[in-house]
Amino acid sequence: MDATFRIAASSHAGTVRITPAGELDVAASRDLETAIAAAVARAPAPAAVIVDLTDVTFLDSTIIAVLVTGQKAAADNGIRLTVVNARGFVERVLVIAGVYPHLRGSQP
């Protein structure tokens, strides 16, 4: 797949918001992983990291693995990482994979 994507990050009031956009597959996985790791490693540590999927049109299993691993790394550092605004196909993939309630923070 010839995916096009971008990943941006911003910080406000102790929260880091990561906003990927486009088609996220193996080609985007390293960049998303790096963005999450950088957010978790910030000093001072943020209270929360939000991955906002509003503008994501596609994701695959490599991205699911990055999100789950990133959430665990954040939790290991006392930081809450949540995924928000998954819609359409992206939401269905996360639900079918069984990870969306956990990533949204509505399930421990």
Image: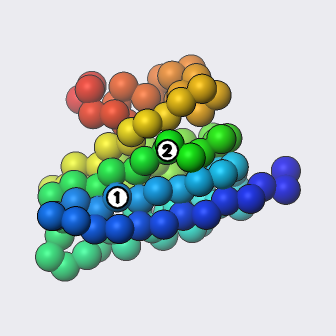
Q: Report the residue marked by disc 1.
A: 17
Disc 2 packing (10 Å; few <14; some 14–19; many ≥20) = many
The residue located at (34%, 58%) in the rendering is 17
Horizontal relation, residue 50 to residue 34: left or right: left
Residue nearer the viewer, 85 or 108 = 85
Quarter of the image for residue 6 reads bottom right
The residue located at (25%, 75%) in the rendering is 42
Image location of residue 92, percent across then percent down: 58, 23
Q: How many discs mark residues in the rendered view? A: 2
Q: Could one spot residue 72 in this view of the protein?
A: no
Q: Name the amino acid, label 2.
A: Leu
Image location of residue 84, percent across then percent down: 39, 39
Quarter of the image for residue 89 reads top right
Indicate which disc residue 53 carries. 2
Q: CA distance from mark 1 to mark 2?
A: 10 Å
Image location of residue 2, percent across then percent down: 85, 56
Q: Quadrant of the C terminus?
A: top left
Q: Describe the colour scheme in one phrase.
A: rainbow
The residue located at (22%, 65%) in the rendering is 12
Image location of residue 47, percent across then percent down: 15, 58
Q: Name the amino acid, label 1.
A: Arg
Q: Secondary structure at mark 2?
A: loop
